[in-house]
Amino acid sequence: MTPLRQRFTEDMQLRGLAPTTQRSYTHYVADFAKFYHTSPEHLDLEAVRQYELYLLHEKKLSPESIGTFVSAVRFLYQVTLEMPWDKESFPRIKRPHRLPVVLSAGEVEQFFQHVPSLKYRAAMMTCYGAGLRVSEAVALRVSDIDSQRMLLRVQQGKGQKDRYAMLSPRLLAVLRTWWRAARPDSWLFPSWRPEHHLTAASLQSACLDAWKQSGLTKRVTLHTLRHCFATHLLENGTDIRVIQVLLGHSRIDTTARYAAVTPQLIGRTISPLDRFGATHRPAPPPVAPCPGPLLSWLTFFGNTAPPIVPRIHCRCRNSASCAPSKCAVPPP
């Protein structure tokens, strides 16, 4: 390992970057150095720009992958090499706005029917029933289940944050069935390797097989189940701020995008085309305004309420000496 790579790795560790982020940054910086056959410390911003165009036009990478490369080299030059280059020196490609794929409740049930393994089915139902990310679901421990308060404790989720997720009675029954069958000690979903939990890649592979067996036309991933969790809660009338907390989002606009894929909200909207030729009831005739007085009263509930006595107020606020027909204040 070169001294530059060693320092680059140490800087990422000191700033608390996730292990997956560290591996991704190291991969992109290593490919960047191999492309020019020299160390990145001898390259400039023009080299970064030309390599970014190479990734876009030659390798046909997605805007998300190119954005990860930009984040990696920006960290390398601004933090490790301490170059006086600002944020605008590293241009990013605009990411297209895409809506998440959401299954209906019937499609979710059809998908689960094609998951043969009890362990995989319980893990996938945890992703859907509690809205967990795949990395959070596989890392659950038996002690994280709080059946008294009906909560799941998520330890060190995305962004190294702890939070609580909901634990529905049906999900609790599924997890208890799995526990009675396997009797896990520490990890709720243990791996075949001792002292390790189930890997995210293994669960993703099982999800892909179940999707192919189900015959659904919509592509199903484990993150799709998380999207379905949020969308179905929104359709059932759950406040979007509660959904934000359950998903672990730090910004409300990240959660608000699920409102765009809620079919019930879209389906209740009437198209202008449907109004062609429709018969409308005539509008009621306008009511002549009162020349002066305004009637106000209090509404009482119950049989013992006192009788309602209207109080007459003139617009000039002088009900004692002014008659409504002679009020000098014009009506509205």
Image: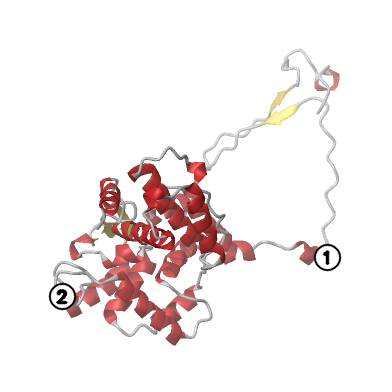
In this rendering, the answer to whether 314 lies above or below 160 is above
Whether residue 9 is visible: yes
Whether residue 249 is visible: no
121 sits left or right of 96 in the view: left
29 sits left or right of 96 in the view: left
Q: Residue at x 50, y 72 (%)?
A: 103
Residue 100: percent from left, percent from top:
52, 65
In this rendering, the answer to whether 99 lies above or below 87 is below
Residue 53: percent from left, percent from top:
55, 59
330 sits left or right of 141 in the view: right
- Asked if marks 2 and 1 touch (Cβ < 8 Å), the reply is no
Q: Residue at x 31, y 72 (%)?
A: 123
Q: Residues within 10 Å of mark 1 (few under 14, many from 20)?
A: few
Nearer-the-camera pick, 20 or 74: 74
Indicate which label's residue lies in the foreground, 2 or 1: 2
Q: Residue at x 57, y 59 (%)?
A: 97
User: Which residue is labeled 2 in the image?
Assistant: 183
Q: Residues within 10 Å of mark 2 (few under 14, many from 20)?
A: few
Marks 2 and 1 sit apart, C-alpha to C-alpha, by 64 Å
Judging from the image, what secondary structure is the residue with disc 1 in?
A: loop
Applied colour scheme? secondary structure
Q: Amino acid at mark 1?
A: Phe
User: Which residue is labeled 1 in the image?
Assistant: 276
Residue 254: percent from left, percent from top:
48, 53
In this rendering, the answer to whether 99 lies above or below 209 is above
